[in-house]
Each structure stands twice: as C-alpha cells, then as structure tokens.
C-alpha cells in the first residue's frame, strides 16, 4: 500500500508535514489550494479515516499512525478560527500520470 505525506501551511505561516498510509488523500485535497481550517479538518480527517479503513481491509487492523495524524491536525486547527485559511503546499508522491487513451 503506497504511503504519502501532505504538507500544509497553517494560517500563521508554519508549514507542517503529515503522514497518510494511503494515497487516498489525493481524493480530498489538492496541492496549491487553500481551504478554511474547518473544511481542511473535515477533508483531511475524512481522508485519514478512509486510509485507516484501507489498512484494516488489507491487513486486518486499523492504522494507528493515520489516527494519530488526524489528532495532530485537530489539535493544530484548534489554535485558529474555523474560517482562517490553510494552504496545501504539497502532496507527495503525486498521483501517477494517466496514460493517454
């Protein structure tokens, strides 16, 4: 199962990298996009919930790292108003390019 990191810039300017055990984060966040803190928390925690369920389906147990990442995001977000902006700096690795059809 491919792992990934996503780097965000919180409203005060600090970039922080987060871990996901699955590329599913690409389905919820887009590099170069800004989301409100509230929307970012919702999107990222939902993505991490999907990621941990993918781990559970494959290995028979949930991913504690994904759950820890979700808690780190919730904690960091609590320092900002819900309508402040978070920028998605990078999603690594990027999704592979689709072959032309």
Image (spheres, rainbow, N blue to C red):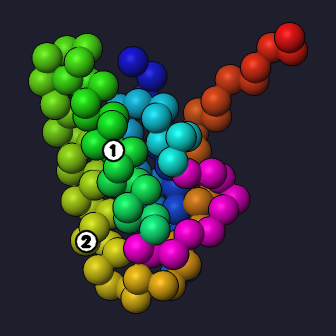
Residue 31 is left or right of residue 3, and the answer is right
Q: Does the magenta stretch include residue 6?
A: no
Quadrant of the snapshot with the N terminus: top left
Instruction: Say if 22 sits above or below 34 in the image.
Output: above
Q: What element carries label 1?
A: helix
Of residues 70 and 93, the one nearer the viewer is 70
Q: Residue furthest left?
A: 61
Local crowd at mark 1 within 10 Å, few (<14), some, or many (≥20)? Answer: many
Q: How many numbered marks appear?
A: 2
Per the rendered image, the range of residues in magenta is: 29-38
Quadrant of the snapshot with the C terminus: top right
Q: Determine if residue 14 is in view.
A: no
Residue 38, position in %: x, y? 41, 74
Residue 53, position in %: x, y? 25, 30
Q: Name the residue under label 2.
A: 75
Q: Name the residue under label 1.
A: 48
Residue 85, position in %: x, y? 55, 78
Instruction: Say if 70 sits above or below 5 in the image.
Output: below
Instruction: Say if 33 sits above or below 95 in the image.
Output: below
Residue 94 is left or right of residue 98, and the answer is left
Residue at 51% in and 48% down: 28
Residue at 46% in and 65% down: 40
Mark 2 and mark 1: Cα distance apart in space: 15 Å
Residue at 40% in and 88% down: 81
Residue 5 is left or right of residue 97, and the answer is left
Q: In which quarter of the image is residue 97?
A: top right
Q: In which quarter of the image is residue 48?
A: top left
Q: Is mark 2 on a helix, strand or loop?
A: helix
First in sequence, mark 2 or 1: give its number.
1
Residue mark closest to the camera, 2 vs 1: 1
């Amino acid at each position: 199962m491919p792992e990934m990191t996503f780097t965000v810039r919180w409203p005060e300017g600090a970039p922080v990298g987060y871990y996901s055990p699955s590329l599913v984060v690409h389905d919820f966040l887009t590099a170069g996009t800004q989301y409100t803190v509230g929307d970012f928390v919702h999107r990222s925690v939902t993505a991490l919930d999907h990621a941990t369920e993918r781990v559970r389906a494959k290995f028979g147990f949930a991913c504690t790292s994904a759950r820890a990442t979700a808690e780190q995001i919730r904690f960091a977000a609590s320092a900002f108003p819900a309508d402040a902006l978070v920028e998605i700096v990078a999603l690594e690795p990027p999704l592979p390019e689709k072959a032309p059809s």
